[in-house]
Image: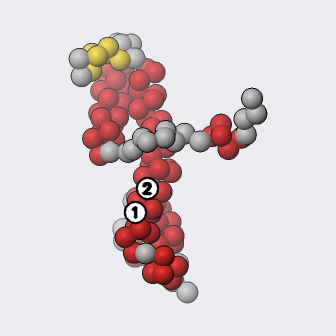
Amino acid sequence: VAVTAAQLSDVKVPGGTITENGLRMNVSVGIQYIESWMRGTGAAAINNLMEDVATAEISRSQVWQWVKHSLADDEMSQLRERYGEEVWAKSRFSEARQVFEEVALSKEFHPFLTLVALSHIS
């Protein structure tokens, strides 16, 4: 079996979708487990299941992946479909995505997103 590097790093599940409920559940489970672990408990009863560090690792990894890649990719696809190819070709959605990711995910809080966006205007 020949496997490419691209295949190894492809984390998408065919037919899988990212939902607000799934995102919220991962955040909640991650926080609840970390709180339990910080009190010295290695396994925690969360949502009627016994969870351990592996569950918290999966939760935080999924959130990271979704934020870093999938959520924005999915939204960009929906926007492209909504606006159509002609409008999309003339748009600045790719730059807008970069600005949004910077202001939403940066370590420091930006006071105004327009100050960051201004650097993209020529």
Give the x, y percent position of residue 120: 53, 78
Tell me if residue 80 can be seen.
yes
Crowding at mark 1 (Cα within 10 Å: few <14, some 14-19, many 20+):
few
Give the x, y percent position of residue 48: 23, 17
**Number of marks in the image?**
2
Is the Cβ of the residue at disc 1 closer than 8 Å to that at disc 2? yes
Q: Is residue 106 above or below residue 33?
A: below
Q: Is residue 76 above or below residue 34?
A: below
Give the x, y percent position of residue 34: 36, 26
Q: Quadrant of residue 2?
A: top right
Residue at 65%, 40% (x, y): give it.
7
Disc sitting over residue 78 in the figure:
1
Q: Is residue 82 above or below residue 61?
A: below
Name the foreground residue: 122 vs 66: 66
User: Residue extending furthest bottom?
Assistant: 122
Residue at 45%, 81% (x, y): give it.
87
Name the foreground residue: 97 vs 91: 91
| Left or right: where 121 falls relative to 2 | left
For label 1, the SS is helix
According to the picture, the residue beneath numbered tag 2 turns out to be 74
Tell me if residue 119 can be seen.
no
Residue at 37%, 70% (x, y): give it.
82
Colour scheme shown: secondary structure
For label 2, the SS is helix
Residue at 44%, 69% (x, y): give it.
80
